[in-house]
């Protein structure tokens, strides 16, 4: 037999204690409004601490894995535990201590130890007739359904299944709180421990209650349920979080402009009273006419200095397609302002990449659609430096955009073009250095580039700085930057795939020598 | 929820159920519980369900992501033709497989999870979904790809000498129109 009888219950109670702790933690990382508030407050003490709050979903998943693991150990331990309890009832031999213990409390049905009260049952029936058993099954099923619908495949493609099934957590928490209400875990009462001291009386069980022995028959009682003490606080916080989201969703957001960009990108410019953002943050957008319960996150592409905030939304799925149609994207004539759909905004959240402005020299690397947060940063830099002529600590920005195809360029290229023009006018053309890398191109396009190689402006983007082909040689880039800026701290910011992140991190480490330090900022915007 | 392919979720649920059934069965056998025969059955049933469910189906819409190393399983499952292609069959099969698991505590959870998976498969079958193997695409390599390996033997076509002389001073005038179109119009 795998688990010794005396250990089975302990093996079940230990993960139960861990589960109390983990179930307390799991609700906290998804209270995004609370975290946003905390982030704002902590920032004054420690930016590093504040940034940890941006990894909230990673933490939520880790805690979920722990809950799954502890649940498994807990269930397996109880399987052994109940098997032993059943053994104790079936082996009806009065020189068998477990049987003697099982007989206690058969008259008053209160002081018993063995939750299995007779030998004419089996563990499965007991499970379905006890509070602990039924709640246990229900919450385990809820947990399993939540996990299977949260697999990446389902989450990315069928978000609604993931989101609605995840609400089974309500059943999970209710069941969890009531799981201990049957007081099925029994221990010797304090009073009984005086009349039947276990270390003296355990072996003399055949003499319990007899006149000459000093061991009375022991009495047991159930332990009061304790889980509620752990989870009540976070449950209340989460309810508050949902109320805040509902409140925010009723605040009026006005769409001031809708722009359809060629690369199947919808730009929404909006205004909301009291809205304040930092660079690189994101918001959740809800459109009740499209879907009442879906909130989708989008990076803000406007700068804080502008009088509106905007998001560039790529049309990739059901929701974005429906939003596009609701905004009149498929119609050719301009829409009346009152026809635009009502939207709600939750946020802004996330990395306030003001960290960008803390470095004298900055490398910004965006891959494909990952360039979106940099739109906000570049615009803000322009406003600060050029328009307001503020002294910005950041003296030089190296911007790398890696893109597989030309189509996604258009709206961002327009932005770069206008920035380039304005900088040339103000004679600060060297402030920003762009490098756009086409990582995939068609044969026919390549021929076109060959012919126009000598042209001053790049044939694709129209920018003075040329589009390059293939992938950047990071070693060269880092070496060049290191040689041009000795004695400085260079901040490297990436929004793109993790492999790129790993290779950039390596480059940062290998090129940090002498007095040049490359600091890789890992956050995924 | 219009475009959801229920089979994708049913597949995750069924695979998880297979693992849970297997785990419960192992515990029942190793611990020599009463009714361990059901546990032994659960081990076999769990393994079977896992093998059947491991290869993911190709999605009707969108890119399909295979599980690592699923190709051999795909070939085996595909060999059963309509039995594995049809989700009604799978729904009833899982419903039937899960029943003996309900007779022993250690395997009850696997039984109920598999039952739920069976219901989701039923929903998928009613909506007309079916299992498609993910097979490696035969890459039709255009002959153009070969030529990339060979560097061009001849220099690119150059404009006539008069235009070439102008190049140094006048960029716009120097560019000449290639008689054949080089862009994908």
Image: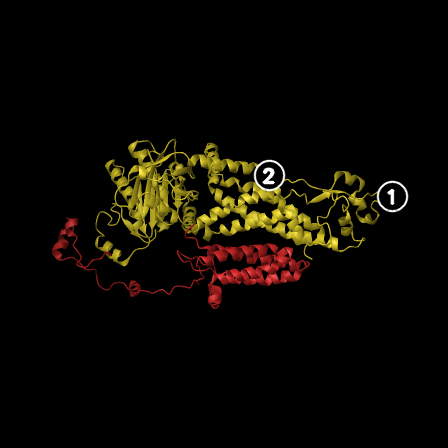
Closer to the camera in the image, B78 or A33: B78
Coordinates of residue A239 in the picture (x, y in percent): 51, 37
Q: What is the letter of the yellow chain?
A: A
Tell me whether marks 1 and 2 sit on the same chain.
Answer: yes
In the rendered image, is residue A303 in sight?
A: no
For the point 66% across and 53% down, the residue is A125
Which residue appears farthest toward the right when viewing the image? A212
Q: Earlier in the sequence, mark 1 or mark 2?
A: 1
Q: Quadrant of the N terminus of chain A?
A: bottom right
Q: Vertically, is A414 above or below B29?
A: above
The residue to which callout 1 is attached is: A211
Closer to the camera in the image, A368 or B19: B19
Chain B tint as drawn: red
Coordinates of residue A485 in the picture (x, y in percent): 35, 41
Coordinates of residue A162 in the picture (x, y in percent): 47, 48
Which residue appears farthest toward the front when viewing the image? B126
In the rendered image, is residue A265 in sight?
A: yes
Coordinates of residue A525 in the picture (x, y in percent): 41, 43
Q: Which quadrant of the view contains residue B23?
A: bottom right
Could you classify mark 1 by the number of other residues whose Cα lies within 10 Å: few (under 14), some (14-19), or many (20 or more)?
few
């Amino acid at each position: 037999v795998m688990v010794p009888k005396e250990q089975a219950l302990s093996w079940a109670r230990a993960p139960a204690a861990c589960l109390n702790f983990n179930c307390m933690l799991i609700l906290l990382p998804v209270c995004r409004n609370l975290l946003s508030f905390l982030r704002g407050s902590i920032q004054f003490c420690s930016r590093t601490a504040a940034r940890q709050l941006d990894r909230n979903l990673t933490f939520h998943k880790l805690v979920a894995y722990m809950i799954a693991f502890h649940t498994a150990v807990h269930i397996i331990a109880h399987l052994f535990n109940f098997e032993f309890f059943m053994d104790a009832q079936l082996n009806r031999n009065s020189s068998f201590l477990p049987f003697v213990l099982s007989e206690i409390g058969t008259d008053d049905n209160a002081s018993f130890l063995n939750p299995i009260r007779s030998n004419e049952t089996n563990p499965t029936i007991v499970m379905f007739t006890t509070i602990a058993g039924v709640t246990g099954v229900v919450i385990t099923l809820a947990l399993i359904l939540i996990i299977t619908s949260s697999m990446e495949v389902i989450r990315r493609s069928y978000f609604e299944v993931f989101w609605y099934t995840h609400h089974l957590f309500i059943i999970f928490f209710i069941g969890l709180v009531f799981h201990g209400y049957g007081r099925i875990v029994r221990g010797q009462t304090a009073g009984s421990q005086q009349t039947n001291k276990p270390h003296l009386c355990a072996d003399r069980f055949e003499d319990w209650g007899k006149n000459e022995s000093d061991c009375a028959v022991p009495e047991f009682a159930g332990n009061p349920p304790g889980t509620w003490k752990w989870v009540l606080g976070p449950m209340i916080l989460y309810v508050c979080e949902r109320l805040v989201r509902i409140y925010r969703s009723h605040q009026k957001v006005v769409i001031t402009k809708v722009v359809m960009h060629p690369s199947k990108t919808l730009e929404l410019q909006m205004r909301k009273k009291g809205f304040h953002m930092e660079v690189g943050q994101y918001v959740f957008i809800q459109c009740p006419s499209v879907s009442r319960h879906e909130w989708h996150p989008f990076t803000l592409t406007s700068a804080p200095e502008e009088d509106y905030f905007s998001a560039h939304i790529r049309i990739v799925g059901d929701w974005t397609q429906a939003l596009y149609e609701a905004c009149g994207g498929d119609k050719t004539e301009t829409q009346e302002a009152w026809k635009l759909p009502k939207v709600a905004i939750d946020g802004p959240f996330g990395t306030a990449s003001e960290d960008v402005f803390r470095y004298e020299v900055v490398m910004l690397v965006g891959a494909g659609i990952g360039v979106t947060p940099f739109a906000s940063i570049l615009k803000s830099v322009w406003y600060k430096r050029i328009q307001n002529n503020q002294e910005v600590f950041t003296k030089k920005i190296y911007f790398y955009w890696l893109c597989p195809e030309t189509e996604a360029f258009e709206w961002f290229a327009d932005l770069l073009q206008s920035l380039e023009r304005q900088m040339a006018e103000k004679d600060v053309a060297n402030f920003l250095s762009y490098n756009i890398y086409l990582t995939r191109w068609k044969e026919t396009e390549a021929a076109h580039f060959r012919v126009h190689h000598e042209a001053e402006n790049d044939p694709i983007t129209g920018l003075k700085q040329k589009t390059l082909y293939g992938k950047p040689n990071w070693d060269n880039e880092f070496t060049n930057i290191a040689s041009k800026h000795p004695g400085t701290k260079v901040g490297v910011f990436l929004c793109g795939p993790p492999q790129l992140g790993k290779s950039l991190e390596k480059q940062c480490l290998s090129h940090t020598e002498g007095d040049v330090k490359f600091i890789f900022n890992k956050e995924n915007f | 929820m219009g475009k959801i392919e229920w089979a994708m979720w049913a597949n995750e649920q069924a695979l998880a159920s297979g693992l849970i059934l297997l785990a419960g069965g192992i515990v029942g056998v190793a611990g020599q519980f009463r009714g361990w025969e059901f546990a032994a059955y659960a081990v076999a049933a769990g393994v079977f369900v896992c093998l059947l469910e491991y290869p993911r189906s190709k999605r009707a819409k969108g890119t399909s992501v295979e599980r690592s190393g699923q190709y051999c399983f795909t070939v085996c499952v595909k060999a059963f033709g309509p039995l594995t292609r049809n989700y009604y069959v799978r729904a009833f099969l899982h419903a039937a497989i899960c029943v003996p698991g309900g007779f022993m505590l250690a395997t009850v959870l696997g039984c109920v999870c598999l039952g739920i998976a069976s219901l989701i498969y039923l929903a998928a079958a009613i909506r007309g979904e079916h299992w498609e193997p993910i097979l490696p695409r035969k890459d039709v390599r255009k002959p153009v790809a070969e030529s990339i390996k060979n560097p061009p033997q001849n220099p690119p076509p150059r404009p006539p000498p008069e235009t070439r002389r102008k190049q140094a001073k006048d960029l716009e005038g120097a560019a000449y129109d290639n008689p054949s179109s080089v862009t994908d119009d």
